[in-house]
Amino acid sequence: MKARPLHGWDLSPREAIALQTRLRDRVERADRIGAVRRVAGVDVGFEAEGRITRAAVAVLDYPGLALVEQSVARVPTRFPYVPGLLSFREAPAVLAAFEKLRMAPDLILYDGQGIAHPRRFGIASHVGVLLDCPSIGVAKTRLVGEHRMPANRRGAWAPLREAPETIGAVLRTRAGVKPLYVSIGHRVSLRTAIRWTLACAPRYRLPETTRQAHRLASGR
């Protein structure tokens, strides 16, 4: 599964911000998603005191959510940690892991932001656009925007807004636990992103895609 060569990675933070602003118009906010038989999750960590970025991709079948393929890639870390520019630090390793897969997923659920981002181009959108694959940002914490808390039941959600637009949903995947921050990554609508997040999180707060990718990355 190869990425489209839309840009290089040897960028300064200022150049990276300009690139996000330029590429955000490539994000498709309407549904362009076919039959979903495989869903993927990603986990990223660092080794050698941050000098190596390690990305793990777990591919699950749907609707069974059983692990069917996995991939790990390690590449040198070439970009500093800058809030809002996570993809420039992590995506090279993520794309290397996707390139090693034999079976391409039909949908990616990313542990990070999609358009719920200061420039509407978080890592879920960036990776989705480069792979031209439907993707969803499913983050554990809020980066930007304001919201009320959703009702305390599975499936309840509230809009995440940054005036004047709705940039995501604050979604309760289980009663009694903190909600998740769901946003469009690429080629999905917000309603579809909510539906797929719930479908991939039948038992726990986090989607099985995220849980399996983390298990793979941590060796558990």
Image (spheres, grey):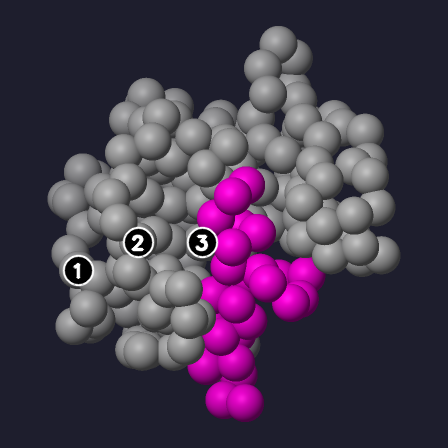
Q: Residues within 10 Å of mark 1 (few under 14, many from 20)?
A: some
Number of the front mark, 2 or 3: 2
Residue 138 lies, in percent from the top left, at: 55, 49
Residue 5 lies, in percent from the top left, at: 14, 44
Q: Are marks 1 and 2 in contact (CB under 8 Å)?
A: no
Q: Amino acid at mark 3?
A: Leu
Q: Amino acid at mark 2?
A: Val
Q: Give the image quarter of residue 30.
A: top left
Q: Amino acid at mark 1?
A: Met
In the rendered view, tell whether residue 7 sits above or below residue 198: above
Number of the front mark, 3 or 1: 3
Q: Answer left or right for 74 relative to 205.
A: left
Q: Residue at x 24, y 44 (%)?
A: 34
Quadrant that contains the N terminus = bottom left
Q: Which residues are magenta?
A: 194-220
Q: Which mark is residue 109?
A: 3
Q: Are marks 3 and 1 in contact (CB under 8 Å)?
A: no
Number of the front mark, 1 or 2: 2
* Of the image marks 3 and 1, the number of the one nearer the N terminus: 1
The residue at which mark 1 appears reads as 1
Q: Which mark is residue 36?
A: 2
